[in-house]
Image (spheres, grey):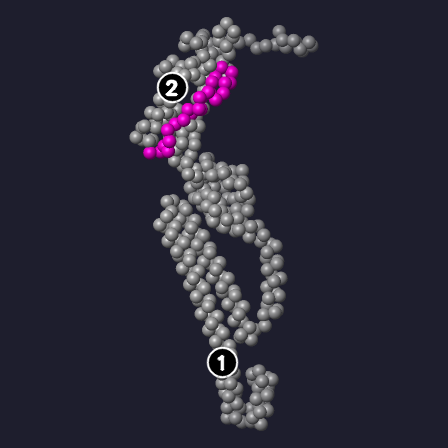
Amino acid sequence: MIESAAKLYSACRGSFHLLMPHLMILGPSQFFSQLWHNFLAGLLTFAETKLPKLIWIAIGSWILIRVIGVISHRIVRAAERHSTRASHLGQVKTLAGVIRATGVAIVAVIAALEVLPLLGLNLGPLLTSAGVAGVAIGLASQAIVKDCLNGFLILVEDQYSVGDVIKVAGLQGTVEAMSLRKTILRDGDGTLYTIPNSQITTVANLVRDFSLATVNVAVDFSENPEQVIEILRKTAMSVREDPLFSDLFLADPVLLGVDSIKGSQVIYPVQFRVKANKQAAPVREFNKRMRLALEEQHILPGDAYRVYNRDGAVSQGATVQTGKAMPKADPTGAKSASVNPFTGDSQ
């Protein structure tokens, strides 16, 4: 009778309303005794066959998670010792956090797939449903996945950092924030742009390592090039040697000579090699001193609309070579040209 009760227990799986009639037949003491015996037998079988596997899975998962944590921690420590930019250190910390979170998630999923069958759960329908759901989610979130992958590569390759001035996706500005999914830029007039990383295919970093500023000085055609170059060289070196700007320079200013001639103006380019994104102040100071130096030497600035005739005369209201200003015509008294509507000739 005890064996029949055990078979009934196995078939009914704890259905109380089906066990009640047999409980009344067997008696409470015999029924609970057999129930306890089966429970102990099942527990012993679980402890002998499945519990060691669960313990090994738990130990292996804990070891892998600890290894991932140690690796990410050492990456951050190495960046703190060698990084010279706070923005780069922030990128490394973000990347280390992403690596740690991704590794822990992978270990947890693998451990769950190993544990659930040991607990008697059938993974076939679950994996089938997860596969269908994964395909649907993947098709719906392709852009997000592409954003994150591209953002991960941007962080790994250190293409730009917070505070850099870059050109991406047809926009230029200063990087205010960046993540795996997006990059935030602010341009010169204060406009804030949010750019998905999947749209970033080409990056132009304007402040990486150093900045090179070129000032094109336009001087009148009549001036001696050697004299102009010497004046520009002295002016540029005065800015280079100024204590307020000397720390910004990485090399002496370079004068490239005569770059081009446009009408009656000659272009003399001057290049400044300075620290990253520090070119504005030296260039402004050079422009101010250059203007005063040219005026002191009575050198005319370049004017694309100044025209010289063959006899040396100057037309179109420009200044003559002697430095004396020609009388300017009153624009209010100028007679407008009239055209004959029948012949098209000017009168």
Asked if residue 83 lies left or right of residue 332, the reply is left
Query: Is the residue marked by circle 2 packed among few (<14), some (14-19), or many (20+) residues within 10 Å?
Result: few
Does residue 81 appear anywhere in the picture? yes
Which amino acid type is shown beneath numbered disc 1?
Glu
Quarter of the image for the N terminus: give it: bottom right
Residues drawn in magenta: 247-270
Residue at x 47%, y 44% (from the top left corner): 159
Query: Is the residue marked by circle 1 packed among few (<14), some (14-19), or many (20+) residues within 10 Å?
Result: few
- Is the residue 153 above or below the residue 267 in the image? below
Residue at x 51%, y 88% (from the top left corner): 37
- Is the residue 263 above or below the residue 68 in the image? above
Instruction: State the residue position of label 2.
Output: 230
Does residue 330 appear anywhere in the picture? no
Q: Quadrant of residue 217?
A: top left
Instruction: State the residue position of label 1.
Output: 48
Which amino acid type is shown beneath numbered disc 2?
Glu
Tell whether label 2 touches label 1 (CB within 8 Å): no
Say if the magenta span includes residue 265.
yes
- Is the residue 90 above or below the residue 68 in the image? above
Q: Position of residue 259 (x, y in %)?
A: 48, 22
Residue at x 48%, y 9% (from the top left corner): 314
Q: Position of residue 50 (x, y in %)?
A: 51, 77
Q: Position of residue 267 (x, y in %)?
A: 46, 20
